[in-house]
Amino acid sequence: MSVTPPAGAATPYGTLPPASPPSQRKPLSLPRLADMHARGEKITMLTAYDATFAAMADAAGVECILVGDSVGMVCQGLHSTVGVTLETMRHHTECVFRGLHRVQGTAWLVADLPFGSYQTSREQALQSATVLMQAGAHMVKLEGGGWTTDTVRFLVERGIPVCAHLGLTPQTVHALGGYRVQGKGEAAAAVLREQALALQDAGAAMLVLEMVPATLAAELTDALQHCATIGIGAGRGTAGQVLVLHDMLGMNLGRMPKFVRNFMQDAGGIAQAMAAYVRAVKDGSFPDDRLHAW
Ligand code: KIV
């Protein structure tokens, strides 16, 4: 089965609409992502957990594919990401890598370090990150601020690109008391500000901001010149956007977060839904800040 359809071609998934202009279909890299960030071009990120969806997202023009530990909830039926193991992340990273490799994909592959795989020590984080990099990841993502700064610096100094993750950090959902908006109020916002700047200083090239007030996310985005913010439920002012694949396809088994748009609703198929997501992020029509109460 081939999943490398040229734009406009009929595919088993429907007719693929034009994705990014051909000039942009070079392999993504840290310098290219930094250049997009500097030019103000929105960066698109989508989760994928297997070869086929990864190849389709790549063909649709998604720049960054995140093998998220959301795999636990989406594919394994877990109640949270806490139960996801490093072996699970290795396996899915390898599947996604193979899918991209098979179609000569250009996407930047980010893989989540799961709960318990980086908290003990910087050395533990390096070992875990090595497993994911050897499975094909270009960058690892880890959650939290403050104590993670040292770990991020340690990994970056050893040649491992890092994406940080602040705001709602699902691995600590029990400590946070649920899937709640973070950074509300001046004191909480000040902590996030300080942590974000420290993570940039430590060398994090990207920062996922999950469920934080849109004004705070926009402010952090302006403050971080060398670290691209990727928002999810954080308004439209971030440097890029990420969604969980199954959410944006309307396939959520539980409650759909209200910041999610179902891109399948008006699409002829999955390829079109992905392409519509890319277009909407690029032209700023997604997300719609009116959908945020925070
Ligand atoms: O695991 C995941 O899918 C994530 C995104 C929600 C950013 O971390």
Image (cartoon, helix red, strand yellow):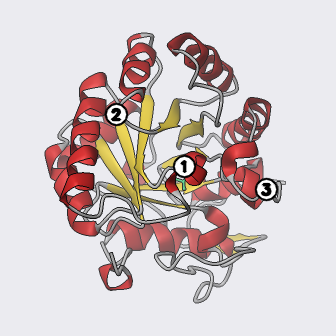
> Mark 1, residues whose alpha carbon is within 10 Å: few (<14), some, or many (≥20)?
few
Q: Is residue 106 left or right of residue 286?
A: right
In the image, 142 versus 148, the foreground residue is 148
What x and y, as percent, mark residue 156?
Answer: 40, 18
Q: Quadrant of the N terminus?
A: bottom right
**Disc 1 CB within 8 Å of nearest ligand 1 atom:** no
- Kindly identify which residue carries mark 2: 205
Looking at marks 1 and 2 on the same chain, the residue that comes earlier in the sequence is marked by: 1
- Kindly identify which residue carries mark 3: 78
Q: Is residue 276 left or right of residue 111?
A: left
Badge 1 vs badge 2, beta-carbon distance below 8 Å? no
Q: CA distance from mark 3 to mark 1?
A: 18 Å
What x and y, as percent, mark residue 201?
Answer: 24, 26
Badge 3 vs badge 1, beta-carbon distance below 8 Å? no
In the image, 90 versus 78, the foreground residue is 78
Disc nearest the viewer among 2 and 3: 3
Q: CA distance from mark 2 to mark 3?
A: 30 Å
Looking at marks 3 and 1 on the same chain, the residue that comes earlier in the sequence is marked by: 3
- Kindly identify which residue carries mark 1: 175
**Residue at 36%, 18% in the rendered image:** 153
